[in-house]
Amino acid sequence: MMGVLLVILLFSGAAITTAAAQALPQALPGCQDKCGNLTVPYPFGITDGCQKEGFPFFTCNTSTQPPNLLWVSAVVSNFSLPEGEMQLQNYISRDCYDKQGFKTSNNKPRIRLPPAFTVSYTKNKFVAVGCDTYAFFRGYRGEEKLTTGCLTLCDTLRSVDQESCSGVGCCQTNIPIGLKNTTLTLNSYYNHTDVWSFNPCSYAFFVEEGHFSFSNKSFDELNNKDTLPVILNWAIGDEEDRCDEAEKRQDFVCKGNSTCVNPINRSGYICRCLQGYQGNPYHPDGCQDIDECKAAINPCNNGDCVNLHGNYTCLCHKGYKKDSINGTKTCVKYNPSSKNMTLKISLGISMGSSVLVVVIFWMYCGMKRRKFKKLNDKYFEQNGGKKLQQQLASYNGSVETEAKIFSAEELEKATNNYHADGILGEGGCGTVYKGILPNKKLVAIKKSKISTNPAHSDQFVNEVIVLSQVNHRNVVRLIGCCLETEMPLLVYEFIPNGTLHDQIHKKDKNRPPLSLELRLKIAADTAAALSYLHYSTSIQIIHRDVKAANILLDENYTAKVADFGASRLVPEDHNQLSTLVQGTMGYLDPEYLQSNTLTEKSDVYSFGVVLVELLTRKVALSFHRPEAERNLASLFVCSMEAGCLDRILDDELIKEGKIEIVEKVAHLAKKCLRLKGEERPSMKEVVIELEELHIISKHQEGKSDYDIKRSPKETDYLLGSPAHVVDVIVTSAEYDHSMQHIQIVKPYGDGR
């Protein structure tokens, strides 16, 4: 009987809520709130003037059945006021070719959002589908430009992963936080000529999670589909409009019987009705009381229901008393003789329950601590922790250079639990956080996105030991690591002056342009570090990702080479390695890209691109330049051969008047950029030539404030990669004001 009563009470409560919600106004007075089956709530509106300032108004297209709500040309399919969300049917991007490889169609969908809107990073994914496909999208987070995407190749339909979007036939990536105004670009390498019979088109799109499942049938399904749902976040105001400040202002929009909520990782605020109220918290009438007493079935059953603001109470009939069943108030049978016994039983149960709760909580905390300890121990062993401890115990290095093993708790405290305010940079392989150790020492902590393969833990341990022993003035030093997490954390020395890429490419009034002498010093420092890696270690190291963003500058503009996540160790009996391509587009050695054969001359080519960046202040790869000029290395070599180098040189260098020295640096860069690796100079030769040019530059105007101070003796230890690199990933980047990371999965066998 009690179960039947509960079902009746819950059903009646739901009926009250539904009926009342349907009757409450959602749009402003005099404004339409329905388009077909969809209710359009304020702060939105169907006609101009019916929406809040800064929010869009929509068009109700009555030519379809049922009518569609249109925002420009996209269909709006749902709203969620409590979550601050709107569902939009977004267009799929297509890139199609005929059998001869001629393009038959290509579109670049855009999502242009007002300031109140962002693309939800928690409920959407970016997906690319095809067997000859690379796709990326660009957008803004405030004034910061962001670019990311992915790539997928496959030779046959059989090679496509049947039920997962794991990189073969389909790849996907997360959406950055706070993304606005996105532009999607889709293209192919071979115009689908090798896969045309089963995949003539590439596809790319944003999609709400759970609304797209990949299989080898997706090629045909996407060809017959135009749109997929995407979730947009919205809020009131900007970064300064948080609830505690917004509530003090006259333009505060949360109306009666509602509360203000600060969404996680979102600017502005949203409004929600208080418990016991329903309706539209943004509407001038605010949220309305739910009258539970008007239900078709009396919730009090054997009593009279009295409605209260946001609640109700029961006046029970004689012989009944008020009670609550799963939070629903009602009247139940009352037996006076059992009052004292019930009180005693209740008191005993209450005390016993309290003791039991304390015991269970104590046992739960103990089990949780043991579980975390067991999990940390599992990761520690899986990542090679015991092997690393044994190596450190037998290692006789100095205190300054010996690697330290940090606990997960230590690094959580150092980074304030990896707070977003401490992010120094983000890339395709991980995120770097600023940290403060208990001794007040500043460090940079790299949190990898790629877990270490247990089969390679020996290599990982060896490389951590090796890298921690390096004490070269132009190499960022590894201080230690943490192995108690699924993905190992690496702790580096903190370099305060940012990257060379930011120094030469980001416009800042407080950051004057670099002089020729200072550019030569930075180039010489970088070349010295690479020469050291190539020739002065017991086992040769090839960096494999030399670029301006991986060259850090300290307070004295001393260059330090960083990010050895892609580096490879070359055994003594080898002068080259066969490996899957990894690096950054615009800096990649063309010979390495074609042959998969890695030598130290691949670093020489990448360094040549950095030299050209120093001379021109142009980014290595830009889609804002004409197609023939997108690749800076090609543009530079063509300009030199045509005798028009001055057209691409940085104006600041021309003003200095040291054209002869600039031309010599340009000729050195051209030699580094030769297509055949054997024709390029070694890094030893590059260092000698750069330091000679630096000395000449100093003597032309007297002693410089930025003299190169070389240590009389550099620690001559082996340098290694601090993290295992997954060889099937190629990280590429397009630099404009931000870096694009495109993950490329290379198939097995004789595939491209």
Image: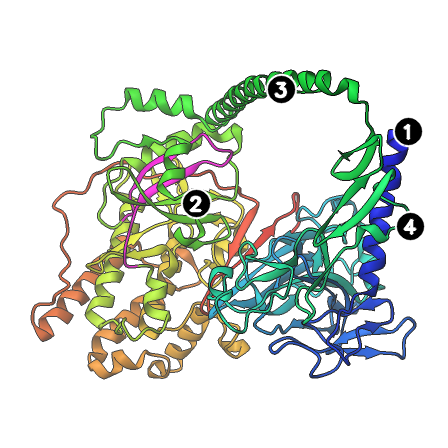
Q: In screen coordinates, is 172 left or right of 475?
A: right
Please state the horizontal and vertical placement of residue 309, each as a whole percent of the image.
Answer: 70, 54
Determine whether 313 is above or below 639 in the image. Answer: above
Residue to which mark 3 is pinned: 353
Q: At numbered mark 4, what does the secondary structure look like: helix, strand or loop? A: loop
Residue to which mark 4 is pinned: 296
Q: Is residue 500 among what the camera can see?
A: yes
Between 381 and 377, the one nearer to me in the picture: 377
**Residue 488 counted in the magenta span:** yes
Q: Which residues are magenta?
A: 475-497
Upstream in the sequence, badge 2 or badge 4? 4
Residue to which mark 1 is pinned: 1
Determine whether 736 is above or below 536 in the image. Answer: below
Q: CA distance from mark 3 to mark 4?
A: 38 Å
The quadrant of the rendering that contains the N terminus is top right
Q: At numbered mark 3, what does the secondary structure look like: helix, strand or loop? A: helix
Determine whether 82 is above or below 388 in the image. Answer: below
Q: At numbered mark 1, what does the secondary structure look like: helix, strand or loop? A: loop
Q: Residue at x 87, y 51 (%)?
A: 295
Q: Residue at x 26, y 78 (%)?
A: 653
Q: CA distance from mark 2 to mark 3?
A: 38 Å
